[in-house]
Image (cartoon, rainbow, N blue to C red):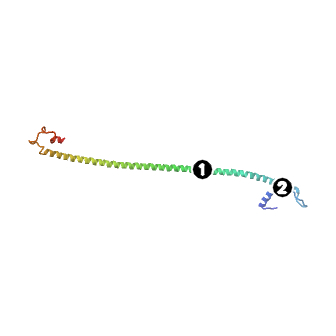
Amino acid sequence: MKSKGTKRISVVNEISSAEILHRNFSTSMLGYQKKEVEEFLEKIAAYIEELEKKLLLSVKQKPARQSEESEKEDYSRREELIGKTLLMAEKTKEELLTNAQKEADNIIKEAELHGKKMVTEAKKHVSILEHEILNLEERKRMFLLRFKAEMEALLEKIRDDDLLLNRDDTPEPEEREEGDAVGEKDIQQ
């Protein structure tokens, strides 16, 4: 009796090894030898019983294997995720450090530029003040020279004044009273 693969599976599912072993066939005149059929059926029953045990064992172990495989996959995924997370954290740390260093460098550069600008401005201011001081000193010197020249000219006029020249009617310096005109020596002081 030939059967297709799908029929064989359905027959195996429907017939157990015990059924094969205890199956009785009716006899006919020209039928098979009963002993040979029984031996063959015993072999088939033993084979099917072994297959049933393997199938049962496989079914019982399958969830355990699936569970183990699932756990392994889960651990692998977690390990991969942790690895990726660590790489990402390391990358983020490096980026933060790089950015912080760049920011620190920029702050230092800005401070240096600001410091140089302040020094330059201070030097300009000092230069302007020095120039003003020189200008004021020159103006003072010029003022003093003019003032001195005017004073000398004024003294010369006073010396040459007829009133102060020794005339006969001019009282001597000793004869003058305190409220009288000032003498030449008094003017020079």
Q: Name the residue under label 1.
A: 83
Which residue is depicted at the point 30% across and 49% down?
132
Q: Pick the quarter of the image with the C terminus.
A: top left
Identity of the amino acid at label 2?
Glu
- Residue 8 as seen in the image, left or right of residue 111: right
**As rendered, which of 59 and 132 lies closer to the eye?**
132
Query: Quick one: label 1, few (<14), some, or many (20+) residues within 10 Å?
Result: few
Identity of the amino acid at label 1?
Gly
The location of residue 183, given as percent across then percent down, is 15, 41
The location of residue 79, given as percent across then percent down, is 62, 49
Q: Relative to 105, does residue 30 appear above or below in the rendering?
A: below
**What secondary structure is found at the residue carrying circle 2?**
helix
**What secondary structure is found at the residue carrying circle 1?**
helix
Which residue is depicted at the point 63% across and 50% down?
78
Classify residue 6 by image quadrant: bottom right
Classify residue 148 by image quadrant: top left
Q: Which mark is on residue 51?
A: none
Q: Pick the quarter of the image with the N terminus.
A: bottom right
**As rendered, which of 88 and 184 lies closer to the eye?**
184
Q: Earlier in the sequence, mark 2 or mark 1?
A: 2
**What is the spatial separation of the Cα atoms under label 2 and label 1, in whole angstroms?**
58 Å
